[in-house]
Image: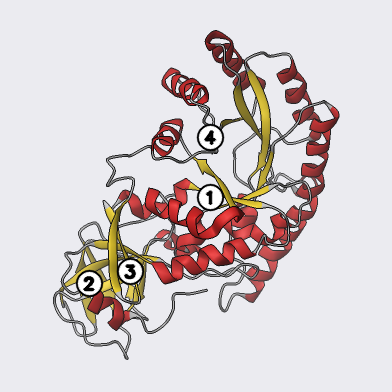
Amino acid sequence: MRPLTGQYERYRSIFKKEPMPLAFVDLDNFDRNIEYIASTQQNTGKSIRIHSKSLRCVDLMKRIFRRGGDQFKGIMTFTMEETAFLAEKGLNDFIVAYPTVQPSDMKTFVELTRKKKKVSLMIDSIEHLKILSEVGKSHKVTLNACLEVDTAYKPMNLPLYLGVRRSPVRSVQDAVDIARASLEMPGVKINAIMGYEGHIAGPNDNLPHKWFMNAVIRLLKNRSINEFTPRRINIAEMFASEGIQLEIVNGGGSGSLVSTGKDPSVTEITSGSGFYAPGLFWHYREVDFIPSAFFAIQVVRIPAEGMVTCLGGGYKASGPTGDDKQPVPVYPEGLKLLPLEGGGEVQTPLVLPKDCPELNLGDPVFFQHAKAGEICERFNFFYLVDKTGIVKKVNTYRGDGKAFL
């Protein structure tokens, strides 16, 4: 779903006295996304783990757990340091989504385990297991590990790889080898497996005026789902046959909540970006989020008729360079970036639509970041707003003085 229409005057009134640039979350939209994401699993028996990298705001994570109730359990984090920070804030039940071997992280892992915090660290090799085993043995603790399985689609043995380059563990035999090795290693235990379907959860498949591209993307998604689902089921069954009791079989992402929810082997699904629903999350067929996180920059120049120029705005997203990583102007509706400048480091020019409301110097223009959590690396806090106006301000990770990657 695209941003709701007709919001410019409301937001302009709310922020008319606030200094820009600023970032805010519309709580009515955010709460609707919480309810919607929960609803996708109400009949599947699966819980939802929230992904911290797509939120990067402790207060909003706690709001999800508070409003979402028992449907939401646990957090997928991206570093061990971040995990310790969230544990200090009273949160628990973590899967650290990316492997690490550095001594400082191993020390933190041991400390969290001794404090009875539930933490599993991602692994994808016997080498990872050996390192964790040595650390666990030397500190007389048992460290939990989550084995990541590659979900990429490789059709008909062609030199084509549709997926993210993460784990080398692809086949059931790959997983068997690691599972059996773990049984011989004290100090470490595999208690979870994960398969992240980035190539299914990520790409938009309901883009306007692009029916052929949408059809191709949907075809590839469906074939990938049909190939990987039996493989994940077989891997989970294999662990049971080897005597390894898995607590968690994790999968999915915001864009694949529905399809991953149909896999009987999965116990929980991870969701993050769907709560903010940034520019890259507008056009899905199976899921439907409402954009809730925005930033505002002020008009400071009128360089020509039918144009304005704003101060700042160069908040581009990570990943391969392309127009889809640009910030998206959403209010007033119909604004366009200039192709030769885009979202600029210190200024962003915009072409106005014919029916644009009058924009004067000092007026705000409202954007969405292309991705979700990355907006928090630019702002110290979010304004939280609802129908009554500004409710309060809450720190982002940056406002808490944290920058984990």
Whether tag 2 and tag 4 are in contact, CB under 8 A, the answer is no
- Say which quarter of the image contains residue 17: bottom left
- Residue 50 got which mark? 1
Mark 2 → mark 4, Cα distance in angstroms:
38 Å
How many neighbours does mark 3 have within 10 angstroms: few (below 14), some (14-19), or many (20 or more)? many
Mark 2 → mark 1, Cα distance in angstroms:
30 Å
Q: Secondary structure at mark 2?
A: loop
**97, above or below 286, in the image:** above
- Residue to which mark 4 is pinned: 98
Residue 8 in picture, x, y percent from top left: 31, 80
Q: Secondary structure at mark 1?
A: strand
- Say which amino acid is labelled 1: Ile
User: In the rendered structure, which disc, 4 or 3, sits on the residue that comes first in sequence?
Assistant: 4
Residue 232 in picture, x, y percent from top left: 77, 43
Residue for point 55% across, 66% down: 35
- Say which amino acid is labelled 3: Val
- Residue 116 got which mark? none
**Which of 200 and 245 lies nearest the eye of the viewer?**
245
User: In the rendered structure, which disc, 2 or 4, sits on the residue that comes first in sequence?
Assistant: 2
